Amino acid sequence: MRIVVTNCNTTRAMTEEIVRGARSAAGPGTTITGLTPAWGPESAEGWLDSHLSAAAVLDALRGYEEEPYDAVVMAGFGEHGREGARELLDVPVVDITEAAAHLACLLGRRYGVITTLDRSRGQIEDSLYTAGVAAHCAAVVGTGLGVLDLGDERRTTEAFLAAAERARVAGAEVLVLGCAGMTGLQRVLGDRLGMPVVDGVGAAVRLAESLVALGLRTSRAGGYARPRPKRRTWSAPVREGGWPGR
């Protein structure tokens, strides 16, 4: 089984970190390939970045022809684009935001999301609402750190612990890592917090594996029907005929 994991920004070092986390979660026989958009923001923080990122990721997926793949994991927490990707691709598309929330709902009555900047909270709340899991979210709490600040492990750990306490006070029984760049923190912080900590990248990889193993694909009845045929101008041409994936 081959899964393509898409970064939502153009920072290749972050793609590599996300891929490491995805591979550590994947089962035997699953191959993980990272995909970095050729254009877009270096970090997605805010509505403008998110919409720009969505277009760039869709463009990257549309033109990806290196090898067949069985599923896509979209590694942008709260970012736009997942619905468009489900229309575009023939393979299952799993977004780390809803994947983490669904698993968190299996572990406690209410969960809290620990994210980067406070400005991302609205996007995440909207994404959870659209996915149907917002009712179980006790709080979305920012750490005050930018996406590109997450490389400082000590600072990130301290900020996460402080934010986690606020989420606990708000009623969270499970915590969700609200940024793909936080992948790996669940191993460090789970025991210290005494609460389950769900990493969206790992959750999405495992859910993608399950969908593929069960032979399930995105429904074409209704909202995720194929895009209507019309002329669309993209950033670069791809082969004629067919659709990405297999």
Image (spheres, helix red, strand yellow):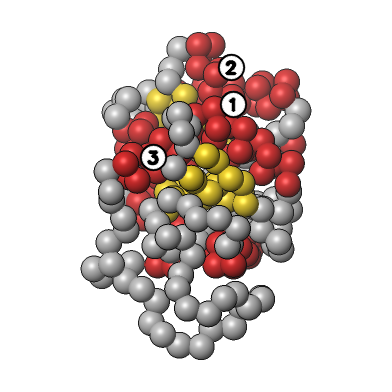
Within-10-Å neighbours for mark 3: few <14, some 14–19, many 20+ = many
Q: How far separated are the C-alphas under marks 1 and 3? A: 20 Å
Mark 1 — residue?
184
Q: Residue at x 45, y 29 (%)?
A: 28
The amino acid at mark 3 is: Glu
The amino acid at mark 2 is: Val
Q: Residue at x 32, y 71 (%)?
A: 225
Would you place residue 212 above or below residue 156 in this image? below
The amino acid at mark 1 is: Gly
Residue 125 in sight from this viewpoint: no
**What number is the disc on residue 160?**
none
Residue 246 in sight from this viewpoint: yes
- The residue nearer to you, when weighing 31 against 170, is 31
Mark 2 — residue?
188
Q: Earlier in the sequence, mark 1 or mark 3?
A: 1
Q: Place residue 136 in its image quadrant.
A: top left
Q: Secondary structure at mark 3?
A: helix
Q: How far separated are the C-alphas under marks 2 and 1? A: 7 Å
- Name the residue furthest left: 221
**What number is the disc on residue 209?**
3
User: In x, y percent, where is residue 69?
Assistant: 48, 52
Q: Secondary structure at mark 1?
A: loop
Q: Place residue 211 in its image quadrant.
A: top left
Q: Earlier in the sequence, mark 3 or mark 2?
A: 2
Whether the residues at callouts 2 and 1 have beta carbons within 8 Å, the answer is yes
